[in-house]
């Protein structure tokens, strides 16, 4: 196996020759049980396994959350449809009820009936006052 050879030493430190670097890298790549590259690959392999596990866990959590939100959306949609139907039914019931009241009340005659009832109430009140004063019997006797 080759070793790195120092070509020269200057103020920045030792300078390694390009040829020795190429030879060391070629030997490392060609060797069965290389030292640096095999250790690096082992480290990268475990890092990749850890990253894969982390991504798988995140994917599983995302799938769970999506399923939960989809179930909530279906529930909310069903509830909204039911509420909409209930409101529509209540509006129809109210309209038919008002139509029945209008038909039964006959609003054309209702005003006349209210006026008659008001006049009757005033008359009853006047009769009650006359009875309190003791004049109602005298008036009734005079009418006979």
Image (spheres, rainbow, N blue to C red):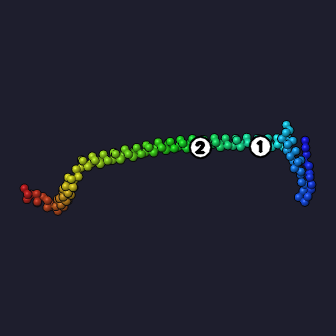
Which residue is found at the position 70% from the left and 41% from the top? 52
Q: Quadrant of residue 132?
A: bottom left
Label 2: which residue? 65
Left/right placement of residue 36 relative to residue 84 reads right
Quadrant of the image containing the C terminus = bottom left
In the rendered image, the residue lying farthest to the front is 19
Tell me where residue 64 appears, x and y as whole percent.
60, 41
Residue at x 63%, y 41% (from the top left corner):
60
Looking at this view, name the residue that lies furthest to the bottom: 133
Q: Is residue 124 visible?
A: no
Q: Residue at x 90, y 54 (%)?
A: 14
User: In the picture provided, is 88 more to the left or to the right than 3?
Assistant: left
Q: Which mark is residue 44?
A: 1
Neighbours of disc 2 within 10 Å: few (<14), some (14-19), many (20+) = few
Residue 83 in the figure: left or right of residue 72: left
Q: On residue 1, which mark appears?
A: none
Q: Position of residue 114 (x, y in %)?
A: 21, 55
Q: Is residue 7 something one can see in this rendering?
A: yes
Q: Quadrant of the N terminus?
A: top right
| Image position, residue 102 (x, y; %) | 26, 49
Mark 2 element type: helix
In this orientation, which residue lies closer to the viewer: 53 or 119?
53
Residue 88, percent across and down?
A: 38, 45
Q: Horizontally, is 27 left or right of 101 in the view?
A: right
Asked where in the image residue 86 lies, by quadrant, the reply is top left
Q: Residue at x 58, y 43 (%)?
A: 66
How many dots with numbers? 2
Q: Earlier in the sequence, mark 2 or mark 1?
A: 1
Q: Disc 1 on helix, strand or loop?
A: helix
User: How far apart in space, not on screen, are marks 2 and 1 (Cα)?
Assistant: 31 Å
Foreground pick, 44 / 102: 44
Question: For mark 1, does the 10 Å Cα neighbourhood hold few (<14), some (14 to 19), or many (20 or more) residues?
Answer: few
């Amino acid at each position: 196996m080759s070793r790195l050879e120092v070509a020269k030493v200057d103020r920045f430190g030792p300078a390694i020759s390009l040829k020795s670097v190429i030879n060391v890298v070629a030997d490392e790549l060609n060797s069965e049980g290389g030292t640096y590259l095999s250790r690096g690959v082992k480290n990268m392999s475990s890092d990749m396994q850890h990253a894969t596990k982390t991504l798988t866990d995140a994917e599983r959590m995302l799938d769970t959350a999506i399923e939960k939100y989809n179930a909530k959306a279906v529930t909310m949609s069903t509830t909204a449809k039911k509420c909409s139907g209930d409101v529509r039914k209540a509006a129809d019931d109210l309209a038919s009820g008002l139509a029945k009241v209008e038909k039964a009340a006959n609003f054309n005659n209702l005003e006349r009936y209210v006026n008659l009832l008001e006049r009757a109430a005033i008359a009853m009140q006047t009769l009650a006052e006359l009875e309190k004063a003791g004049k109602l019997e005298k008036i009734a006797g005079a009418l006979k």
